[in-house]
Image (cartoon, grey):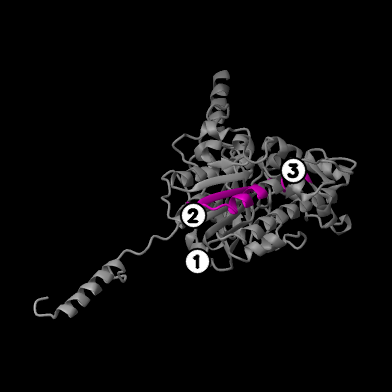
Amino acid sequence: MKGIPMKRRLLLLLCILLTSLHPTRGADQAPAVKAKPNVLFIAIDDLRDWVGYLGDKQVKTPNLDRLAARGVAFTRGFCASPCCNPSRTALATGQRPGQTGVYNNSDDWRKIVPAEITTLPLHFKHNGYYVAGAGKIYHEVFRRDSDWDDYLGKNGSGDEDDLFTRLKRGGRNTASDAPSDGVGGIKFKPLNCDDQDMVDYQSVSYILKKLAQPHDKPFFLACGLHKPHMPWDVPKKYYAMYPLDKIQLPKVPENDLDDVPPAGVDMAKPWGDHADILKSGRWKDAVQGYLAAITFADAMVGRLMDGFDKTPYKDNTIICLWSDHGWHLGEKQHWRKFALWEEATRAPLIWIVPGLTKPGVCHRTVDYMHIYPTLCDLTGLPTPKHVEGPSIRGLLTQPDAAWERPAVMTWLYRNHAVRTEDWRYIRYANGDEELYHNSVDPLEWTNLSKKPEYADQKAALAKWLPTVNNETPGSKMKDPARKANRSKQKAARNE
C-alpha cells in the first residue's frame, strides 16, 4: 500500500476486514448442507385394490384418494408375499422370502434373519434419524423394540396395554348388537363405539404427538394401521355407509377353478371359507364388513394427514403409504390372502416426495422390494449391500418412464408369481403352472399355461423366477424335487 494516502489506506483495510467477516459466496465455496428429509411411513394391513384411486366404484376412500392426488400413485404395486409376516419381513430387510427363509406367519424372523441384515428402521436409526412407530409395522407378534428409539407400548410409552392383545380384540370397546361375529373364520360385526376407542385411533394419536414435538434431527415415523385386517369390527357408522341392498359382489364364475391346477385349487380351498359363506347366505354381509373396515382405515389416514399438514415438517417429509398385501372376497372361490393371484397380491402404493414428485399416476409394475432402496436413495443414505431391489426414484420423477422389471411374489416354499403390465405367470413348487393375459383378462379367468402358442411367453416370464429358495432354518420343510427323488429311490429299493 506504499504511496496510498493514509485515509484511503484505512478505508481499504476496513473493506478487506468486512469482506472477511461477511464473504460473498464464490465459485469455490461449498454450498450449505441441506437438511435431510424426514420420512412418514404409513402401513395399512390387508388393504387390497378396493380404493377409489385404483378405480373401485363401490368403496369410499376420500382420504386415500386425496393423498394419492398429492404424489405418485402406483396402480400396479404388488407385495413380496401375500401374508403379513413374510411380506413385512421382506420389506423391512430388503430380502425376498426365498433369501431369508421367512415364508409364513409362524416364522419368527428375529431368530431367522442374520443379525448383520439391518432392517429399514434400524438403518435409519444408525444413520442419525430419530425412529419411532406405532401399530403394525412388523408382524406385531414379532416386533423388535431395539430397532426403534421409541414405540407405542414400549417401556411404558403411550398406552400401557399390550398392543397385540388389543389388536386381537379390536379396541377398548367391543360391544355390538350384531347377532353373530361373522361366518366361520370370516369375522365381522359393527361396534357400538367411537373412533377413539379403536387401536388405530391410538396409533395415529401417538404419531401426531410425535409430529407436534420439536426434533433436533431428521425423523422416521411409522404408523401401522391394523384395519382392514380381520375382524372387520369397526364403529357401526361405517357399516351404515354401505347398505346391504347396495352391495356389489365380486364376479365369480361357477367354473372359475376348472382350469386351475391342483396346487392352485389347494390354495383356494373352495371347500372352506367360500363354502361356508355360500351356505350362510351372508356374502354381502361379509363384503359390507370389509368395506366398512376400509373406510374406517381411510378415516384414520385422513386424521393423520390433517394433523401432519398443520406441522412445520410438511415441506420436508417424504410420505410412503403401502399395504402389506391384498385380499380375496370370493374371487377364485377363495377368501383371505394366501394365494398368488391378483386379488391377494395387489395393493395401494403412494409416494410423496417434496421437490421431486408431481401429482401423477404410474402404471409400471413394481413390488415392495423397491421401498427400502428407494427410501435410502431419497434421503441420501447408503443402501446396504444385502438389499435386493433397485430404487424406483426414476419412476417418481417420471411415472411413464421405461421400466422392464416385473413384480415377483412368493407364497410358501418355491411357489412364485411374476407379474408384468400385461401378464401373470405362476409356478408352484410341484411344477403346476398358471398364465394369465391380464391386459385382456383382468379377472384372471382363463389359464393359458397349457396352450403351446404361449410357450415363449412363459419362458420369458420364467426368467424372473427367484433362483434362491432357502428352507426355513429349523423347519421340517423339504425341497419337493429332493423329496420326489428320494421317493423314487425308495421305490426302486423296494422293487
Residue name at image x 31 percent, y 71 percent: 24
Residue 255 seen in render:
no
Q: Considering the numbered disc 3 on the image, is that residue within a helix, a strand or a loop? A: loop
95 or 344, nearer to the observer:
95
Disc 1 and disc 2 in contact, CB within 8 angstroms: no
Q: Amino acid at mark 1?
A: Gly
Q: Which residues are magenta?
A: 204-233
In the image, which is nearer the foreground, mark 1 or mark 2?
1
The x, y position of residue 202, in whole percent, is 69, 46
Q: Amino acid at mark 2?
A: Thr
Which part of the image, by quadrant, shows the C terminus? top right
The single residue placed furthest to the left in the displayed view is 2
Residue name at image x 83 percent, y 54 percent: 237
CA distance for labels 1 and 2: 15 Å
**Position of 329 compared to 18: left or right?**
right
Residue name at image x 62 percent, y 42 percent: 432
Q: Which residue is mark 3?
A: 230
340 or 223, nearer to the observer:
223
The x, y position of residue 286, in whole percent, is 81, 48
Q: Considering the numbered disc 2 on the image, is that residue within a helix, a strand or a loop? A: helix
Residue name at image x 43 percent, y 55 percent: 380
Q: Which residue is mark 2?
A: 374
Mark with earlier residue (1, 3): 3
Name the mark on residue 355.
1
